[in-house]
């Protein structure tokens, strides 16, 4: 069994779909941080069969929970203090996301006014569909 040492202070992102941890690593900008980050791929999971885990040293401010909720709202966020889980955060699909995805509609104002933020709102929670706030263009996949 692989053993990764405990985390004194930080965040553990658990129940990541197997193979998705590197996507999340780059989407969250963890590659640009100075803190330690451990990625465990294909760990055994009773609930999922196989899963990925990301351990991040430091405070919660390094993780954009909206971005994470958009990517996969089934991920569990464990807050670690003094070597113990002090809080578990359940993610949900954010109602609004800013500058996470970009509108692909060439006639959208965001393709003309480059400095405008790309704002999408959750149009349909069941189908996880987001729409551009400016032109209503549908965006349903983060890939």
Image (spheres, grey):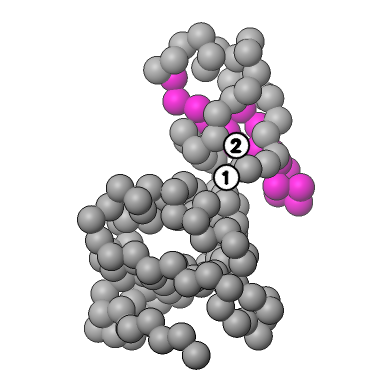
Q: How many neighbours does mark 2 have within 10 angstroms: few (below 14), some (14-19), or many (20 or more)?
A: some
**Among the 4 quarters of the image, the one containing residue 7:** bottom left
Q: In terms of depth relative to the viewer, which is nearer, 113 or 17? A: 17
Q: Bounds of the magenta span?
A: 116-133
Q: In terms of depth relative to the viewer, which is nearer, 134 or 108? A: 108
**Among the 4 quarters of the image, the one containing residue 131:** top right
Q: Which image quarter is the C terminus in?
A: top right
Disc with the residue nearer the chain's start (1 vs 2): 1
66, above or below 6, in the image:
above
- Numbered circle sitting on residue 121: 2
* Badge 1 vs badge 2, beta-carbon distance below 8 Å: yes
Counting from the top left corner in percent of width and height, residue 75 is at 55, 66
- Numbered circle sitting on residue 139: none
Which residue is labeled 1 in the image? 95
- Determine if residue 115 is in view: yes
User: In the orientation shown, which residue stands out farthest toward the bottom?
Assistant: 1
User: In the orientation shown, which residue stands out farthest toward the right?
Assistant: 127
Q: Is residue 117 magenta?
A: yes
Q: Is residue 106 magenta?
A: no
Marks 1/2: CA distance? 6 Å
Locate residue 17 relative to residue 89 in the image: left or right: right
């Amino acid at each position: 069994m692989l053993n990764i040492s405990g985390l004194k202070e930080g965040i553990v992102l658990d129940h990541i779909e197997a193979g998705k941890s590197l996507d999340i690593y780059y989407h969250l900008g963890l590659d640009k941080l100075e803190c330690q980050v451990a990625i465990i791929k294909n760990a055994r999971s009773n609930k999922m069969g196989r899963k990925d885990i990301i351990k991040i040293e430091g405070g919660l401010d390094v993780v954009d929970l909206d971005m994470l909720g958009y990517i996969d709202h089934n991920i569990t966020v464990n807050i670690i203090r003094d070597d113990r889980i002090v809080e578990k955060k359940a993610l949900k699909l954010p109602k609004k996301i800013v500058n996470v995805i970009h509108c692909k509609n060439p006639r959208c104002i965001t393709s003309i006014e480059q400095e405008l933020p790309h704002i999408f709102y959750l149009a349909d929670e069941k189908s996880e569909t987001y729409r551009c706030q400016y032109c209503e263009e549908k965006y349903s996949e983060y890939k």
